[in-house]
Image (tube, rainbow, N blue to C red):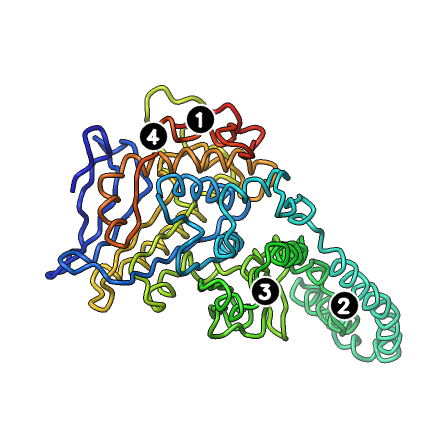
Amino acid sequence: MLPRSGAARVPVLEGRSPRNGGCRRFGRGSGPWGPRVGLTLIQRSSGLRPPKNPKIALVLAGGAVSGGAFKVGGLKALDEFLVGRKVNELDTYIGLSAGAFLATSLAAGITPDEMIEALEGTSRRIDQLRPIDFYSPNIGEVIGRATVFGARLAGYLPGLLLDLLSVLPDLPERLGPYLRRLLEEPTYTHLEAFLMEVYEEISPKRQFPPLGALLPSGAFDNAPLERWLATNMAKVGVPNYFADFYRETGRKLYITATNLDNAERVVFGPENDHGLTISEGVQASSALPGFFKPARFNGVDYVDGGVRRTANIDVAVEQGADLIICYNPFRPFLNNPHASGRVGSRFLADRGLQTVINQVLRTMLHTRLAMGLRPYMHDEQFRGDIVVIEARETDEKFFDLNPLEFWRRADAVKHGLESVRKTLLDSADVLQPIFARYGLEFRPPSDSARPASAGSAARPGAPNLRVVSNSTPA
């Protein structure tokens, strides 16, 4: 089914199997620089009967602060389109990094509106997520490393002096031949040989304490985030153990992290929690290398789950999901340096190193996700559908948001809400039959039913989002 008039054009990409299915990417407008809508479909259910008891999985990629907040806004937009069954009422939730926080919250029954309220501090059920929870300095490790370095340095200097004194008595005898040869024939070669021997005899035999040992394994410690999540899970009234969580809520929750020492992915879930609670699994999954120190549990160091995978669609497939909704906020920005009417720098490189790194990391994450999706275009064992929601390729405002700027979270929520709302609206005619196949009623909200903005008081207790208020939906 094609979109209605005015919606994004839908080209069919390679990947159709002889029997059914295929991959469609939405939104390439007229010309190579037309508007890009962040939606990709892999359909493997064509021609098959709808499953009797379909399983629906939500897979959330990472995104740090701005990407996580962007996803909160996007989840709110998706919630607006779902009638009856909402995003916090699905069967399976899979998350990594920032997506692990959101997946846990949704599986616990927390709505996107409540997440927004928690970000701004107006929630009655959930504590506010404060900057100090995110930017908690790794002071303990810094002090510990400085102490060890100081002790090694204190032992190094006296030892160096003792080493020098021990070689002085034998120094004339060892240097004598080199010195005599230099005096007899003063050439550069003999001078170099003499100096090299002097250096060899008096140079330190013990290693200077490496300055790199002063650097901590991460600038911040994300343990406060684990405590925040554990506290609020208790307040909401859900267990903090994967198996107990599943038995009580009926929803499966999977969190992934990366084992730093063997570089393998670790999946925490009801079948195997590896000895961690849910909040500890989320801490392990969100230990962004360099920014947060690795999370050590039971003798294992964990780092961000995004190090190994951009998303974990394979986990959803293994759990028997029929419809998989994947949400990835980071994709490379499609810059047109030759567009007319451009203001400011034409080329991304002109904006400096931060922009270059931003584009490169987005490209790596997005490419990895695309490679992970490719096998399911022809997988004869998978007979479901995959819906991938992303930011638009031409979304410069979101591209310019620093992923680690906590104070820009409201801007990211607003932008995610408006961006995903427009994507879903443009593609509604294609998404409606896909969602209906799995018992989900997908209906574009009417202007009267839809809030005027992410922060308008469309209903009592609606979140304000402060800087988002009085905005107009895209």
Which circle marks residue 18 in the picture?
A: none
Distance from Cα at disc 3 to Cα at disc 1: 37 Å
For the residue carrying disc 2, how many other residues have a C-alpha within 10 Å: few (<14), some (14-19), or many (20+)? few
Q: Quadrant of residue 349?
A: top left
Q: Which marked residue is nearer to the observer: mark 3 or mark 2? A: 3
Which circle marks residue 452 in the picture?
A: 1
Secondary structure of residue under mark 3: loop
Q: Amino acid at mark 2?
A: Leu
Q: Amino acid at mark 4?
A: Ser
Distance from Cα at disc 4 to Cα at disc 1: 11 Å
Dot placed on the residue nearer the N-terminal end, 3 or 4:
3
Q: Which marked residue is nearer to the observer: mark 2 or mark 4? A: 4
Residue underneath mark 2: 183
Q: x, y percentage for residue 410?
A: 55, 35
Secondary structure of residue under mark 2: helix
Dot placed on the residue nearer the N-terminal end, 2 or 4:
2
For the residue carrying disc 4, how many other residues have a C-alpha within 10 Å: few (<14), some (14-19), or many (20+)? few
Q: Residue at x 46, y 39 (%)?
A: 73
Dot placed on the residue nearer the N-terminal end, 3 or 2:
2
Q: Amino acid at mark 1?
A: Ala
Dot placed on the residue nearer the N-terminal end, 3 or 1:
3
Q: Which marked residue is nearer to the observer: mark 3 or mark 4? A: 4
Q: Are marks 3 and 2 in contact (CB under 8 Å)?
A: no
Q: Amino acid at mark 3?
A: Asn
Q: 190 or 164, which is in the foreground?
A: 164
Depicted 114 relative to depicted 465: above or below: below
Quadrant into which the C terminus falls? top left
Which circle marks residue 240 in the picture?
A: 3
Q: Which marked residue is nearer to the observer: mark 1 or mark 2? A: 1
Horizontal side of residue 228 vs 356, given as left or right: right
Q: x, y percentage for residue 100?
A: 51, 56
Which circle marks residue 446 in the picture?
A: 4
